[in-house]
Image (spheres, grey):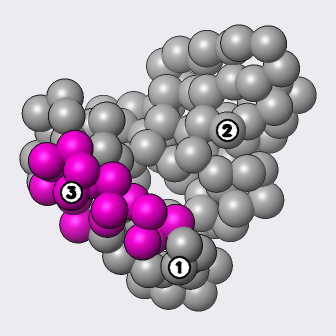
Amino acid sequence: AIAAAKLGWRPVLAVDHELPSIQATAENAERNAVAVEVLRRDLRRDEIPQARTVAANLLRPLLLEYAGRLGPPPERLIAAGLLIAECDEISTAFTARGLLEMERRESGEWAAILFAASAHG
């Protein structure tokens, strides 16, 4: 979230369930002189905030839950924090919700996937 704000994205919303993560994000946004709204949410139970672009740096089980609860798909979604072996399963979950896999990037054993909303979405 902080990197997105530093790159000029506006507005930026950071969502986490862990209170220490929320506090650290708010403090680091202030230190970096960027505007980031920080909310505490449980993506398994709480309402999922809507956004045009989503960066979801989550572990596989939570990414699958998020995909299953996703309402109207965002224009762009980056699923990160994945092990390479998890990519196909995550891709299937999000493409079933109307997103198209546009690109995969791998580094060591980790990967990220960029999705975009289908034109027929």
Task: Please say if the residues under marks 2 and 3 sit with CB atoms less than 8 Å apart.
Answer: no
Q: Alpha carbon of mark 2 to alpha carbon of mark 1: how far? A: 20 Å
Magenta segment's dominant SS is helix
Residue assigned mark 1: 19
Foreground mark, 1 or 3, reads 3
Front one among 58 and 2: 2
Is residue 11 depicted above or below 5 in this figure?
Answer: below
Q: Residues within 10 Å of mark 2 (few under 14, many from 20)?
A: some
Amino acid, disc 2:
Gly
Where does the image place residue 7, in percent across and percent down from the top left?
19, 28
Where does the image place residue 89, in percent across and percent down from the top left?
80, 40
Front one among 102 and 32: 32
- Quadrant of residue 117 within the rendered picture: top left
Foreground mark, 2 or 1, reads 1
Is residue 77 depicted above or below 103 in this figure?
Answer: below
Q: Is residue 33 magenta?
A: yes
Front one among 50 and 73: 50
Q: Is residue 42 magenta?
A: no
Which of the image's four quarters has the C terminus? top left
Query: Residue at (42%, 71%) from the top-left corner?
Result: 23
Query: Residue at (57%, 39%) from the top-left corner?
Result: 79
Where does the image place residue 37, in percent across and percent down from the top left?
23, 66
Q: Outermost residue, right direction?
A: 85
Residue assigned mark 2: 81
Amino acid, disc 1:
Leu
Q: Alpha carbon of mark 2 to alpha carbon of mark 3: how far? A: 25 Å
- Can see residue 92? no
Mark seen at residue 30: 3
- Quadrant of residue 95 within the rendered picture: top right
Give, as a single range, the part of the protein colored magenta.
21-37
